[in-house]
Image (spheres, rainbow, N blue to C red):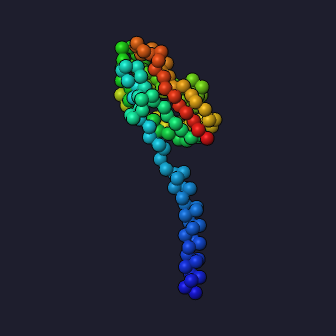
Amino acid sequence: MLRTNRVLLAVVFALVLGILAPLAIAGAPPRLITVIADKDNRFKIAGQKLPVITLKVNEVVHLRITAVKSTEWDKDGTVHTFTVNALKDQGWDLRLKEGTQDFTLVAPAEPGSYVVECTVKCGEGHDDMKMRLVVIP
């Protein structure tokens, strides 16, 4: 009888873990990625020489972007943008005012490599203000 109770308890425990573990993962907060859109007209991510964001298909991500004013900016006060032209219709067109702003986005459903660029004329070096977004299966 004691052995049967232990086996039953083990089965119930395994079932509960099997059901609750995926729910805990799915309910986890989005991953936080911190980006700097700097005054030298470069995107920067701490610990990376060439900034790249790698996400899984449909992954929810929280971007914390700090924008630093360079020598030029838009009339509305936008100092940089964080834009993926191929994904604009999915919300990947962020106008950045000076300071830190938070955005929650969803990676596209299709794997691929995307160019992130600044679309505001922000000063010398603007044309090279680019980085990569890589989406993996």
Q: Quadrant of the N terminus?
A: bottom right
| Residue farthest right in this picture | 110
Q: Nearer the viewer, residue 31 or 76?
A: 31
Reply above or below: 62 against 99.
Answer: below
| Residue 104, horizontal then vertical, whole percent | 49, 37
| Residue 6, horizontal then vertical, whole percent | 55, 79
Q: Nearer the viewer, residue 27 or 31?
A: 31
Reply above or below: 45 against 9.
Answer: above
Q: Is residue 25 visible?
A: yes
| Residue farthest front in this picture | 49
**For the point 57% across and 36% down, which residue is it?**
135
Reply above or below: 72 against 101.
Answer: above
**For the point 44% across and 37% down, which residue is it?**
33
Q: Is residue 101 visible?
A: no
| Residue 94, horizontal then vertical, whole percent | 48, 27
Reply above or below: 21 against 1.
Answer: above
Q: Give the image quarter of residue 3.
A: bottom right
Q: Nearer the viewer, residue 57 or 77?
A: 57
**For the point 47% across and 18% down, which residue is it?**
128
**For the point 61% across and 41% down, which residue is it?**
137
| Residue 5, horizontal then vertical, whole percent | 56, 81
The image shows a total of numbered marks equal to 0
